[in-house]
Image (tube, coloured by chain):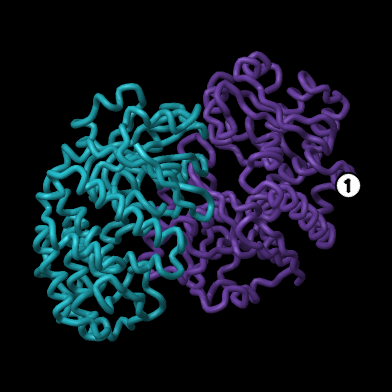
Chain colours: A cyan, B purple
C-alpha cells in the first residue's frame, strides 16, 4: 500500500493505492463505520464486510434517486447512527455518489470515505467530491460538492467486475487522455482492454495516472469556475442521452465524446484525422460511437444541463488530442448543428 | 433601510433592517429570482410578489419534509431554473429552512436569500446558515450549513402575523437573553408582548439586538464545534417533544428551557430564584412551562439528538441568567433526573 495526499480547499484527501480492504478500519479512528454498498458488490464480497453494519442498496443508475437516499437515512436512524458515524461507500459510481450525498446531509454532515470497486469509480466518480442523485431523466440534478476523508484502492475488487463495467470505465479514461494527456492517449492505443484486464501492473499504473489527472484538475478548481469544466467533455450530450435511453454512463459519454469531436471539427478547427483516431480508440475499447435517437427530446433534456448559462451552454471542445477548451455556444447555434453531430 | 454585514467563514451575509420588499430585486444583480413562500404568506402578501415566479408550499412544521423538497425541485425544473436562479425564501422558519436546503442541493448549490416574516424567523431561523428538514419525529435530521447572500427585514410582514406566532418567536428571544444577555432579560421583564406588538420602534430594536446576539455567536463558531452549541439551550428536550406532540417550536423550546433550568439547578449550582424568574418571564409571554408527556417516548427520541456523543449528550446548562455552558451528561445520568426535570 502507498499513499498520495491531494489538498482541496477545505481538506486533504488521502488516496491509498494497492491497498487491502482489511486495513480500512485503521483509517477512521474511533468513529463508527457504516458500510454502504449495492447488492452485487455485497454478493461477491460479503466476507470482507462481516464486522461492520452494512446498508445495501439496489444496483444500477435507475436507483440513484431520492428514494434510495430516503431509504439509507431511515436505515441510519434505525442503526442509531449519530455524528460519530463514518460512512464508507463501497461500489461503483452510483454507490459513491449516493454515499457522498447522504454523508453531506445526514445530521448536517458526517465523515465518509470510498472504496471504489469499478474502473469508472476508481478513475472518476469517487474523485473530486461531486455527489448527487438524478431527478427523472436529469442527471445529478441534486447534490453537493464535499470531499471524502480517503479513497481506498483495493484492486482485488476488479476481479469480480463484469467486462461491460470495464468497458464503461474506459470512456472516462479516454476522456482524460483527450482533454489533458496525449501521451496517455498513445499508451491506450498501444494496449487493449484485454491487456488491462489481465495485467495487474498495467491497470494499477493506469489508475494512478488517471487519479493524478483528475485530482490535478479538481484541486486547482474544486468548485468548477474554470478548468474543472473540461472534465465535462462528452458529458453535455452524454448526460442528455444517458437516462433518456437508459444506457450505461460510459456508453453515453462515448457517444457524447464523438458528438463533441464532430462539433470541434465544425467550429473549433479540430482536425478530422484526430477525431477519427478518437472514434477508433473508443471502438477498440468496445464503446459505442453512435446512436439512433430523437434529436428533439435530447435537445429538450440538454436545455436543463447544469452548465447552461442564460441562452447557451458552456461546451467543451478539443483543439488537439490532449488539449481542450471551454466555449460558450448559444442554444440556437448548437441546435443548428445538432442533427449533424449526433 | 440600513445594513449590517456579518462575516462567516466563506462569505459575508448582509442584513438589511427596516427595509421595503419592493427594493429586494436590486440585491440580486442579473440572477433569476424565484420566490419560495407558503400559502399563508402568499394569501396575505400576493401583491408584493406579482413580478416573480412563486413556488408555494403548505404551511406548518409537518410539511418541513423531503416530500416538500421534492415538490420544490420539480417546480424549479419545470420553471427551467438553472445555476443563475436565486431563491428567496419568504416566510417563517419552515420556509427559510427548506429554501436554504433546496438552494444547497439544487444543481449542487445555487444562491439564496431570506425575507423572514415571523419573529421566530427574524431573530433565529433565518440566521446562521443551518437549514434542513425533519424525518418523522426527528427534527432537522437532514440538512446542511450554508449562508444566504442576505437577510431582508421588512417589518410590514409582522402586521399580518397571528398572535400565536408572536408568542412562538419570543421563546427564542428569551433563550438569547438566558444564555448571553442579562440586560436583554431585564428589558423583557419590563415590557409585555402587547408592547412589542404595538410599538414599532421597540420591536425593531428587539429584533436588531437579537440578530446581533445570534450573529455574534455564529460568526465565532459557524460549524458548531464550541459556543454555537449554547444556542441549543432548551432545544435538546424541546426537539424531542416538538414533533412527538405536534406542538409549535416555541412552545416546545419554552418547555425545554424550563427543563434545562431544572437540570441546571440540580447539577450546575443554578439558583432556584433565577430559575423562577425565567419560568415567570416565559409565562408572561404566554408560553407553556410544563407538559403531560410519556417520558420513555421522549427519552427514546432524545437519544437520536444530533448533539449526542457516544453514550451521552452535550447539554446546555445555566450558571446565571446570561451565562450558559456546555456540559457532557451521560444518558444514564440524564435518565435518572428525567422525570423530575420534565
Residue A259: which quarter of the image?
A: bottom left
Question: Is B85 displayed left or right of A190 in the figure?
Answer: right
What is the quadrant of the N terminus of chain B in the image?
Answer: bottom right
- Percent of width and height locating residue B169: 70, 47
Residue B264: which quarter of the image?
A: top right
Of helix, strand and loop, which one carries label 1? helix
A250 over B143 or under it: above or below: below
- Percent of width and height locating residue B227: 71, 40
What is the quadrant of the C terminus of chain B in the image?
Answer: top right
Nearest to the observer: residue A160 or residue A107? A160
Nearest to the observer: residue B279 or residue B307? B307
Nearest to the observer: residue B195 or residue A298? A298
Q: Can the viewer see residue A298? A: yes
A322 over B336 or under it: above or below: below
- Percent of width and height locating residue B235: 65, 35
Q: Chain of mark 1?
A: B
B341 over B70 or under it: above or below: above
Identify the residue at horizontal 59%, vertical 63% (top origin). Answer: B113
User: Which residue has dot 1 on it?
Assistant: B187
Amino acid at each position: 500500500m502507498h499513499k498520495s495526499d491531494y489538498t482541496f480547499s477545505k481538506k486533504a484527501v488521502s488516496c491509498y493505492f494497492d491497498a487491502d480492504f482489511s486495513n480500512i478500519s485503521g483509517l477512521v479512528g474511533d468513529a463508527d463505520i457504516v458500510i454502504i454498498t449495492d447488492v452485487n458488490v455485497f454478493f461477491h464480497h460479503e466476507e470482507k464486510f462481516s464486522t461492520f453494519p452494512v446498508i445495501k442498496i439496489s444496483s444500477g443508475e435507475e436507483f440513484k434517486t431520492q428514494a434510495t437516499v430516503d431509504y439509507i437515512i431511515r436505515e441510519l436512524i434505525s442503526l442509531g447512527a449519530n455524528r460519530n458515524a463514518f460512512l464508507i461507500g463501497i461500489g461503483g459510481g452510483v454507490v459513491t455518489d449516493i454515499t457522498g450525498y447522504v454523508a453531506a446531509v445526514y445530521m448536517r454532515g458526517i465523515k465518509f470515505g470510498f472504496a471504489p470497486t469499478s474502473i469508472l469509480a476508481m478513475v472518476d466518480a469517487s474523485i473530486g467530491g461531486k455527489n448527487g442523485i438524478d431527478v427523472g431523466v436529469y442527471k445529478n440534478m441534486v447534490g453537493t460538492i464535499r470531499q471524502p476523508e480517503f479513497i481506498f484502492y483495493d484492486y482485488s475488487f476488479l476481479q469480480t467486475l463484469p467486462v461491460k463495467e470495464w468497458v464503461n470505465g474506459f470512456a472516462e479514461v479516454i476522456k482524460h487522455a483527450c482533454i489533458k494527456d496525449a501521451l496517455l492517449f498513445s499508451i491506450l492505443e498501444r494496449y487493449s482492454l484485454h491487456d488491462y484486464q489481465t495485467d495487474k501492473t498495467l491497470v494499477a499504473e493506469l489508475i494512478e495516472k488517471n487519479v493524478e489527472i483528475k485530482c490535478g484538475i479538481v484541486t486547482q478548481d474544486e468548485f468548477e469556475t474554470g478548468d474543472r469544466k473540461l472534465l465535462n467533455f462528452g458529458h453535455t450530450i452524454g448526460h442528455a442521452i444517458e437516462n433518456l435511453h437508459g444506457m450505461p454512463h460510459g456508453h453515453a459519454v462515448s457517444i457524447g465524446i464523438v458528438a463533441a469531436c464532430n462539433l470541434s471539427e465544425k467550429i473549433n478547427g479540430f482536425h478530422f484525422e484526430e477525431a477519427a483516431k478518437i472514434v477508433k480508440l473508443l471502438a477498440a475499447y468496445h464503446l459505442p460511437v453512435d446512436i439512433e435517437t430523437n434529436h428533439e427530446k435530447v435537445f429538450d433534456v440538454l436545455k436543463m444541463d447544469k452548465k447552461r448559462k442564460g441562452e447557451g451552454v458552456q461546451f467543451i471542445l478539443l483543439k488537439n488530442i490532449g488539449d481542450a477548451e471551454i466555449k460558450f455556444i448559444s442554444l440556437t447555434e448548437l441546435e443548428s448543428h445538432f442533427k449533424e453531430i449526433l
